[in-house]
Image: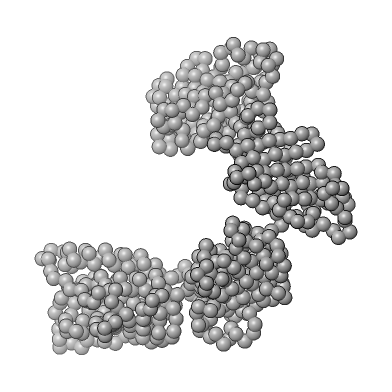
């Protein structure tokens, strides 16, 4: 049986919502414009929660029969299948809300004239747990009443008109009534994963066990697990949805599964899914312990999942919770670099407490947690006590727990021997590891002169030597309010804001340079103030232009001292307010 593309599945829940709205309109209007308010009757009077079975009969397919269980709805006829919870919700809501306006029909005409017999007939029957049954039939569209169909309720013998859209939820393709969920599990409930089969590349099962906050491998041999890869495996398998229902478990079980994944759940239960050979052009058989029939999924899904021992074991130099680290010490032959996390963010803690670039610190942490390390070659006898260490990094958590890694000088060409608190044995990393490892304090220093986010800016004030310019944000656009009121050129205004947000200094001036330039006593060429939408100052920047020396200097309330900045900022600062006026 060919699979139905997911994009063609009708939005049955949306249909149910639209139908409910239409039924409310029917109750209010009673149907045709200008008619007096008319009586409407529910087609089913049974309480929806008491419905235990439901059947749908149409002329173009075998009858569908559903039963409600403790775990949800199941299809019993024309075949056994777990039923789609979403589709059955739409079906039950339609049955519950469907009403009709009583009408008279010409009794001399055959029922087939109204679609209440023959190929257009839809019959729906519901039964309660105590054996009560009710049914109704939907026929063809009423010719002079577009949007309504003939309807008949056998128990009362009455004819009605009901909304035509109700037919759609009862005439969906068979596959849309079936549950496409492969495994109904949450990641948080899984305690252990066992993978077996040829695709794992191991003769022994690969077993990963949760030891919060980490995953640990216990087979084929003990090793630290890679949390990121385990999460990728779980998300990949738990998100599987059937795209086909081959309805033949025998075909799928002719050979051993290529991969079987078993899950041990926190409540003591187990679930499993097995992957078998492909069939058709692009589908693959799978089976689960929960579902007593085969399912079809797109072929090749497993190829993108980490399922081998090597893929699931951690190769990181260190393993720790990045959010728990509050201090980092980097030690080299040339000295130490200290980084400390404060409430306001990371700071350099060596000689003076200056802000550190959070992005640079995150890059360092990621490098330590994501770097792949290898076992040292067997012919190398490297021990910590006989290795010259060129780099040591120590990380301290909030509770005092320390993690460390040390790298020695290169041996055998391009191999750096390493030691860490995370690994029992020495390891090796490529010598080019140090190329991405910044050990210069300047790299970690936050060189931004202003500290604000462009999305929170409400106004910008530029005090020049000749005039004061004020820009105020209006929605996503800008207004010029000083020295005249006018619509502002928004791209230029935003360009100024973004340039100020990203502005960094290239060098800090020494005391001698400050004295020589006279900046401390000279009035700046520009004073720029950034405020939020409530008028609170977010940053202030003074700018001096040394035209003779070709330099641009700046100072900020956020940083002590005077700094050299890139002259490109002058391209964003308007010399005259007319540069910012919006011109059609």
Coloured how?
Answer: one colour
Image quarter of the C terminus: top left
272 relative position to 177: left or right: right
Q: Name which quarter of the figure residue 364 lies in.
A: top right
Which of the two residues, 331 or 450, is positioned nearer the viewer here? 331
| Above or below 113: residue 20 | above
| Above or below 577: residue 347 | below
Residue 97: image x %, image y %? Answer: 25, 70
Tell which residue pokes out farthest to the front in this image. 400
Residue pictured at 69% horizontal, 19% vertical: 510
Residue pictured at 20% horizontal, 74% vertical: 42
312 relative position to 76: left or right: right
Residue 396: image x %, image y %? Answer: 65, 43
| Above or below 552: residue 106 | below
Residue pictured at 54% horizontal, 36% vertical: 343
Residue 249: image x %, image y %? Answer: 55, 85
Residue pictured at 40% horizontal, 79% vertical: 74
123 relative position to 353: left or right: left
Asked whether residue 229 appears in the rendered view, the answer is no
Asked whether residue 157 appears in the rendered view, the answer is yes
Residue 444: image x %, image y %? Answer: 67, 36
Which of the two residues, 101 or 582, is positioned nearer the viewer here? 101
Tell which residue pokes out farthest to the left in this image. 36
């Amino acid at each position: 049986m060919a699979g139905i593309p997911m994009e063609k599945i009708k939005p049955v829940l949306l249909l149910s919502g639209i139908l409910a709205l239409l039924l409310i309109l029917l109750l209010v209007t009673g149907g045709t414009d200008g008619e007096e308010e008319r009586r409407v009757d529910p087609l089913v009077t049974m309480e929806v929660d008491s419905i235990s079975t439901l059947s749908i009969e149409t002329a173009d397919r075998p009858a569908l029969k559903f039963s409600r269980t403790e775990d949800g709805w199941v299809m019993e006829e024309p075949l056994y299948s777990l039923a789609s919870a979403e589709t059955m919700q739409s079906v039950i809501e339609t049955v519950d809300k469907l009403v009709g306006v009583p009408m008279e029909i010409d009794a001399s005409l055959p029922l087939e004239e109204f679609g209440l017999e023959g190929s257009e007939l839809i019959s729906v029957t519901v039964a309660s747990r105590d054996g009560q049954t009710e049914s109704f039939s939907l026929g063809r569209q009423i010719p002079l009443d577009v949007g309504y169909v003939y309807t008949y309720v056998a128990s009362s013998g009455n004819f009605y008109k009901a909304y035509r859209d109700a037919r759609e939820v009862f005439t969906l393709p068979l596959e849309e009534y079936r549950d496409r969920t492969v495994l109904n599990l949450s990641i948080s409930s899984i305690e252990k994963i066992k993978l077996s089969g040829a695709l794992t590349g191991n003769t022994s099962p690969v077993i990963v066990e949760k030891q919060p906050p980490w995953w640990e491998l216990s087979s084929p041999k003990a090793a630290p697990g890679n949390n990121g890869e385990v999460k990728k495996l779980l998300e990949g398998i738990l998100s599987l949805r059937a795209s086909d229902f081959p309805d033949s478990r025998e075909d799928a079980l002719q050979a051993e599964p290529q991969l079987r994944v078993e899950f041990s759940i926190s409540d003591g239960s187990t679930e499993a899914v097995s992957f078998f050979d492909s069939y058709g052009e692009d589908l693959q058989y799978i089976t689960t312990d929960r579902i007593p029939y085969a399912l079809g999924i797109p072929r090749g899904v497993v190829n993108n999942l980490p399922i081998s021992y090597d893929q699931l074991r951690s190769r990181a130099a260190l393993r720790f919770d990045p959010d728990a680290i509050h201090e980092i010490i980097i030690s080299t032959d040339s000295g130490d670099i200290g980084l400390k996390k404060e409430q306001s963010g990371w700071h350099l803690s060596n000689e003076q407490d200056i802000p550190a670039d959070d992005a640079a610190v995150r890059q360092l942490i990621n490098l330590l947690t994501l770097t792949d390390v290898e076992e040292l070659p067997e012919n190398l006898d490297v021990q910590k006590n006989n290795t010259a260490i060129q780099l040591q990094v120590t990380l301290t958590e909030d509770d005092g727990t320390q993690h460390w890694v040390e790298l020695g000088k290169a041996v055998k060409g391009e191999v750096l021997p390493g030691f860490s608190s995370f690994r029992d044995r020495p390891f090796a990393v490529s010598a080019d590891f140090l190329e991405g490892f910044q050990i210069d304090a300047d790299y970690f220093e936050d060189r931004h002169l202003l500290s604000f986010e462009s999305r929170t800016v409400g106004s910008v004030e530029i005090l020049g030597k000749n005039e004061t310019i004020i820009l105020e944000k209006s929605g996503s656009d800008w207004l010029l309010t000083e020295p005249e009121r006018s619509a502002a050129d928004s791209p230029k205004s935003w360009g100024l804001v973004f340039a100020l947000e990203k502005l960094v200094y290239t060098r800090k001036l020494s005391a001698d340079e400050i004295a020589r330039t006279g900046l401390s006593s000279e009035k700046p060429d520009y004073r720029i103030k950034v405020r939020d939408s409530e008028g609170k100052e977010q940053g202030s920047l003074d700018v001096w232009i040394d035209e003779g020396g070709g330099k641009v200097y700046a100072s900020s309330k956020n940083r002590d001292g005077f700094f050299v900045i890139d002259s490109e900022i002058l391209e964003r600062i308007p010399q005259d307010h007319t540069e910012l006026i919006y011109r059609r």
